Image (tube, rainbow, N blue to C red):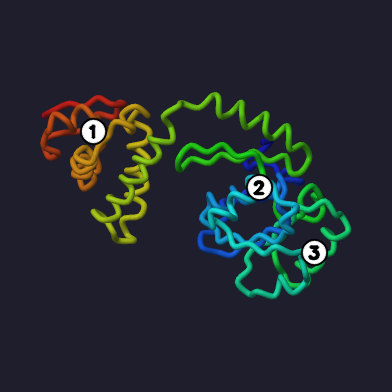
Amino acid sequence: MTGKFPEVQGGGSLILAWQVRNKKVLVIGGGEVAAGRILNLLNADAKVTVISPRDGLNDEVAYRIDQKQVEYFDKRFEPSDLDDPRITLVLTAIDDPEASTQIWKLCKERRLAANIADVPPECDFYFGSVHRDGPLQIMVSTNGNGPKMANIVRRRIAASLPPNIGNAISKVGELRKKLRVVAPGNEEGPKRMRWMSNVCVQWSLEDLCDMNEDDMARLLQYYAPDRVPSLDNIRLDEDPDEWQFDGSYGWACVV
């Protein structure tokens, strides 16, 4: 940053958390790469359809099919397979570059977002290396330049994270849902965001992990006066009207 605003760095991708829950995604191919793609899609609750001759199936893909986790067609791809209007994404993972390019062109004609494995110029989006811990997902992308390097960087990041961070995030998610019941109005939005932010900053990961349903109910009583007590204060069962936050982290004074 050389001035008031950050400089533009071209050549990147717009990294998004694409919501494909209950949406139909077509996977063409059944090998090792397809297996990884399918698992990513199932983890995102997509409705996966696989097209591949059975003699080309990877053991994991065959398992997904046998367990009815995906819809399966034992055949080679045909252009008419793209005619289903419910298809949201198309992923190819086949060893035929010419056929892959043809599928890419067909997808462009139908305005379907597609990923052609190992051919960056024929991809509307890339798959990065993902670390998953409950609700936490961290993706590292090299924009098609070095998939192995993305994996190395992702492992290093994951190794630096606290082992309980996924559980802490789950508890924060539960608290946010309860807060929306306590303060449902749109006009409460800024206050809800500020208050939740204060909880995340002032409580340790260990406190968030240890928080139970009773603690959440008690903590939510402090939302109206816009205060954030420590977990110890909550468990002392003090009256929110008699408690004031003094601006420090995890300390309170009773007046």
Q: Quadrant of residue 5?
A: top right
Q: Find numbered disc 2 in the image and state the secondary structure of the residue it sits on.
A: helix
Identity, as a three-letter code, of the amino acid under mark 3 = Ile
Q: Which residue is mark 3?
A: 103
Counting every numbered tag in the picture gives 3
Q: Position of residue 78 (x, y in %)?
A: 77, 69
Identified by mark 2, the residue type is: Ala
Residue at left 72%, top 39%? Answer: 142
For label 3, the SS is: helix
Say which of 223 and 152 sits in front.
152
Give the residue displayed 34% in from the left and 43% down from the top.
196
Estimate how packed mark 3 is, as few (under 14), some (14 to 19) or many (20 or more) residues with alpha carbons within 10 Å: many
* Secondary element at image label 1: loop
Q: Residues within 10 Å of mark 1 (few under 14, many from 20)?
A: many
Tell me: residue 141, above or below residue 250. below
Q: Earlier in the sequence, mark 3 or mark 2?
A: 2
- Where residue 116 appears, as percent x and y from the top left, is 77, 54
Task: Quickly name the residue at label 2.
Answer: 35
Amino acid residing under circle 1: Pro
- Compute the Cα span from label 1 to label 2: 47 Å
The mark nearer the N terminus, 1 or 2, is 2
Quarter the C terminus occupies: top left
Report the residue at 39% width, 35% height from top.
167
- Pair 3/1: label in front: 3
